[in-house]
Amino acid sequence: MARYIWEVPPLDEAAAARLARDAGLDPVLARLLVARGVTDAGQAGRFLHPSLDHLHDPFLMAGMAAATDRVLAAVAARERIAVHGDYDVDGITATVLVRRALEMLGGDVVHFVPERVRDGYGLNASAIERLHGEGVSVVVSVDCGIRGDEAARRARALGLDLVITDHHEPGERLPDAVAVVNPKRRDCAYPDKHLAGAGVALKLVQALCRRTGHDAWMPAFVKIAALGTLADAVPLLGENRVIAKLGLDALSRGPHKIGLRALIESAGLAGKAIDAYHVSFVLAPRMNAAGRMSTPDIAMRLLLATDDDMAHEARELAARLDAENARRQQEERAVFVEARRAVEKDPDVGSRHVLVVAGEGWHRGVIGIVASRLVDAFGKPAVVLAVEGDAVHGSCRSIPAFDMLAGLQACEAHLEQFGGHRAAAGLTMRREAIRAFRQAIAAWAEERLSPDDLRPRLRIDARIGFRQITPGLAQTLSALGPFGIGNPKPVFATAGVRLADGPRRLKERHLSMSLRHDGVPLRAVFWRAAERAAEIAALADGLDVAYSVQQNTFNGATSVEVSLADVRPAGGGVP
């Protein structure tokens, strides 16, 4: 049984042929570009070869001129400026970007990143009061603040100027701040609406650099912004692609300041070509672990370490991140086991269109990851609630067919606070509201989701045979990276494949096998699919396979292999 519904979206074959001819591209690459909305040679050049020149004018963003004016006036007058960030990778890198830029401009700058358990999420009045008490006269929020109405009112009352930069969905009215910079503002005509928090912070830095004649600083800032962009759930198209592509090139090439260098070395990536996978699954989890398990200040101090004299401290901080990440993994495993058991054993949880699980003593720092794992395991939106006495903190993750933020808005009578966007959100509530909230959001979802919506889709980019899978094709496909939301790794399908050898278990959780089609053998790996070994063996004489193409280097030799996304019995056509 296939895990997914396989879909081949319609493609404009004439446009693909025209693009291949006009841009001199491999026909497979042209087809993939057209499927991603790239239809002419100019667009193809920008997609395949992005440059800093492709970043939009930052002053096209509503509020940017006012924000830049106030910040530069504060720098000139030596007013104390605080950068208020968030405790995830996006918020940490955004904080680092703005703080470092202001320091380089000669500003008197401090930063404040809330701790998840002690301070809660987002910009709040107590943080404004604290910063005011420390002599701050201007606060610049990054990756937060768009719903910080109470904080804005308190800032206004104290005579403190608030500049908000954020990328989350605004409410009906904007906070009463000196400037609100967010491409999702309803009155903002900025052409790229889906920047990460670090991306919006980078636009502020770009505006500051442009006003002060320091455009040459931008490449170093893009490198940091790429970490936040790749770690956040934003489409890797438009400016996000420019940031990610150029940033990854710089992360791979170096040189780096001592803090970033220590992070890369501790992750075992020194001297390697760093790609989106390395950021999302190697570097970002280490940085996130600080905010999840203890204090984000560990990651902040590491990225702000610029002097080689700080090498010993940087290595110690990187080691602490490794330790916190190991502790995070242990907590995550324990909570996921309990959450999955609740879904499978409690019909009031598992039968609903939105999974809402709650646990006493679950670590607040891992519930977002657990929610993501529940979505992957069951194909349904998931809300994971950490119960601490009468207080409940929740993290939500969704599927493409379900708008999680709209669902929370429909259930706001049961919530104390909530925020986020379509795919991911956070909330707080009282313990006694859990049952009513579970019923309310499930009822709302059941009016909007069909059974087919709850079965994940697998987009097939093209049907090909194994004879077309060559080192040249693998190299051609690499030009499309970095891959992620909005630009997924291409998936191909081949019908009537035979199992030549295996499958064999690989590190307990995975499968390795040899496949054969049209006389051509290929090694295949099926990640996290050990439980499907018997099913695949039973279909040895006829499989349809969906997969991505990858290169594998071992002992200095590079070969082409496939990474399976799904399998099903042959005979039904593809798809």
Image: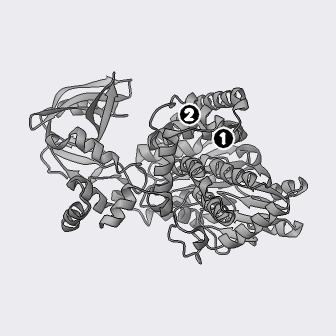
Secondary structure, mark 2, is: helix
Depth order, front residue of 368/181: 181
Q: Is residue 277 left or right of residue 135?
A: left
What residue do we see at 62% from left, 61% from top? 206
Is residue 139 positioned above or below 307 on the image?
A: below
Query: What kind of residue is marked 2?
Result: Ile
The quarter of the picture where residue 298 lies is: top right
Mark 1 Cα shell of 10 Å, populated few (<14), some (14-19), many (≥20): many
Query: What kind of residue is marked 1?
Result: Leu
- Give the mark, 2 or 1, whose residue is nearer the N terminus: 2
Secondary structure, mark 1, is: helix
Q: Quadrant of the N terminus?
A: top left
Q: Position of residue 321 (x, y in %)?
A: 64, 32
The quarter of the picture where residue 42 lies is: bottom left
Q: Position of residue 112 (x, y in %)?
A: 76, 50
Q: Is residue 447 left or right of residue 362?
A: left
Q: Which residue is mark 2?
A: 264
In the rendered image, is residue 148 in sight?
no
Depth order, front residue of 485/333: 485
Q: Which residue is mark 1?
A: 303
